[in-house]
Image (cartoon, rainbow, N blue to C red):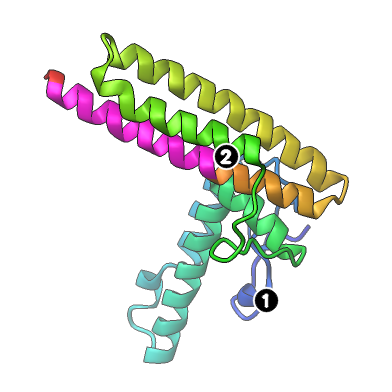
Amino acid sequence: MNDSVNANDLFAKNYFEIFALDVTFEVDAEAIAERHRELQKQYHPDRFASADEAQRRLAMQQTSLLNQAFQTLSDPLLRAQYLLALQGVDMNNDTDTSMDGAFLMAQMELREAIANVPGRDDPLAALDELMNESKHNTKHYMDEFVRLYAADDLMAARDSVRKLQFLFKAQQEITALLEQIEDELL
């Protein structure tokens, strides 16, 4: 794969092509970060400070695209969603409310457990336990996504990604509550 990215065709490439990567879920985070630094040096708007308005605007657009691509490829949930989008799979986040009932019940129980943490004798240990459980489930659904995506079972892979969205949100809630409790303990 060609490592150079021409300014004229940057917008015609997908994020994996921009970063000279194979289109796959498994990526090398360090390679992405290094490639992002290289591309930023090439396209950063400061390099075009003395250029005409059109070139400065193009540099801003290119930098914005590079940052979006970097963020997407660096985040496993966004990367999975992007892989599905490249295959024409719409996540229908706002309109699709169907979901595995057992999974939804487990998520409601997790949310209830998170809400009850402040009343526990050892809230930090409770949060640690909830985070470990959530990370375990996240790994399960990421592995499931990789397997289903590789098997070209895109709708089932989509369902795995939707479950991952719930789990990542729960992890954010756990982290926020952890920070709040730690602040109160100080």
Q: Is residue 160 above or below residue 184?
A: below
Question: In percent of the image, x 39 and y 82: which residue is there?
Answer: 56
In the image, what residue type sits under mark 2? Leu
Residue that badge 2 annotates: 104
In the image, what residue type sits under mark 1? Ala
Quarter of the picture containing the C terminus is: top left
Question: In percent of the image, x 79 and y 54: which residue is there?
Answer: 154
In-image side of 114 versus 182 (left or right): right
Q: Earlier in the sequence, mark 1 or mark 2?
A: 1
Residue range corresponding to the magenta coloring:
166-184
Residue 92 placed where, x, y %? 62, 64
Q: Is residue 12 above or below residue 4?
A: below
In-image side of 41 versus 137 (left or right): left
Residue farthest to the right, as pictured:
151
Residue that badge 1 annotates: 12
Q: From the viewer's side, name the closer residue of 17 and 131.
A: 131
Residue 94 placed where, x, y %? 53, 64
Q: From the viewer's side, name the closer residue of 89 and 35.
A: 89
Q: Are marks 1 and 2 in contact (CB under 8 Å)?
A: no
Q: Main secondary structure of the magenta part?
A: helix
Q: From the viewer's side, name the closer residue of 81 and 163.
A: 163
For label 1, the crowd category at 10 Å Cα-Cα, with few meaning under 14, some 14 to 19 and many 20 or more, is few
- Helix, strand or loop at label 2? It is helix
Residue 67 placed where, x, y %? 47, 61
